[in-house]
Image (cartoon, grey):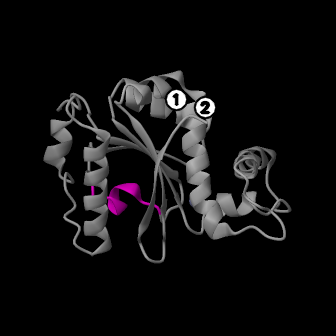
Amino acid sequence: MTSNANLTPAKVIHELKAGHERFRQARSIHPHATEARLHELEQGQAPHAAVLSCSDSRVAVELIFDSGFGDLFVIRNAGNSSTPGSLASVEYAVEALQVPLVLVMSHSGCGAVGAACKPEHLLTPTLMDHVGHIRNGLKGAGLPFEPQVDLTHAYGLHARVTARELINSSALLRNQIDNGRLEVHAACFELHSLEINWLGAEHEA
Ligand SMILES: [Zn+2]
């Protein structure tokens, strides 16, 4: 187990971009994928980033960033939303594991964001709450819902809204950002082109 003491947000963004570039160019090296690597990590983990992504089966985070065991602390739920569980998981990664970067990554074709933009969609009450939260966030960020929603814009905007919600909900995250130890970035993965639209660091709003 190594320490994250010398890692900076910029270094980690650079690593993620390099891994994603290998994946996009079909040059993945699948690092840290062996049983030996897992044994090295038995006493503890020091992942370089926390990634909050969608549970969508097409958004396989470790593959998209060409990473392996111990590299990323991945939190997923339908629509990569800020929930008590995802926020607590992000706080754990920042406080206990000292990750200098949190990445909220949404994706094109997201069913949860799509449902949030179509209120007539039939859902269970729990799903209705979850999707309603996404909808309220998009509305609060000024996304026009009439005459129809620009979904391409909604996918990326939702990542930015979620990143802001995490920051606004957590004194720990705000402290670490103020100290220069942490950045919370938003991004959107494009399923067709395999590209990632990097949307930059978010701040308290
Ligand atoms: Zn999704």
Residue 117 versus residue 39 in the image, above or below = below
- Dot 1 falls on a residue whose secondary structure is helix
The foreground one among 132 and 37 is 132
Q: For the point 17% across and 39% down, which residue is it?
A: 39
121 sits to left or right of 15: right
Residue 7 percent location from the top left of the image:
23, 36
Q: Amino acid at mark 2?
A: Pro
The foreground one among 73 and 125 is 73
Question: In which quadrant is the C terminus drawn?
Answer: top right
The foreground one among 13 and 46 is 13
Residue 175 versus residue 45 in the image, above or below = above
Residue 174 versus residue 21 in the image, above or below = above
* Label placed on residue 7: none
83 sits to left or right of 9: right
- Dot 2 falls on a residue whose secondary structure is helix
Q: Residue beneath label 1, please?
A: 88
Q: Is residue 111 shown to the viewer in this render?
A: yes
Magenta extent: 59-67
Q: For the point 34% across and 42% down, which residue is it?
A: 49
Q: For the point 37% across and 25% down, which residue is it?
A: 179
Q: Is residue 71 shown to the viewer in this render?
A: no
Circles 1, 2 touching at the beta carbon (< 8 Å): yes
Question: In which quadrant is the N terminus drawn?
Answer: top left
Q: Residues within 10 Å of mark 2 (few under 14, many from 20)?
A: few
Magenta segment: does it hold 201? Answer: no
Residue 42 percent location from the top left of the image:
21, 33
Which image quarter has ligand 1? Answer: bottom right
Distance between the Cα atoms at labels 1 and 2? Answer: 6 Å
Q: Residue beneath label 2, please?
A: 84
Q: Residues within 10 Å of mark 1 (few under 14, many from 20)?
A: some
Q: Amino acid at mark 1?
A: Ala
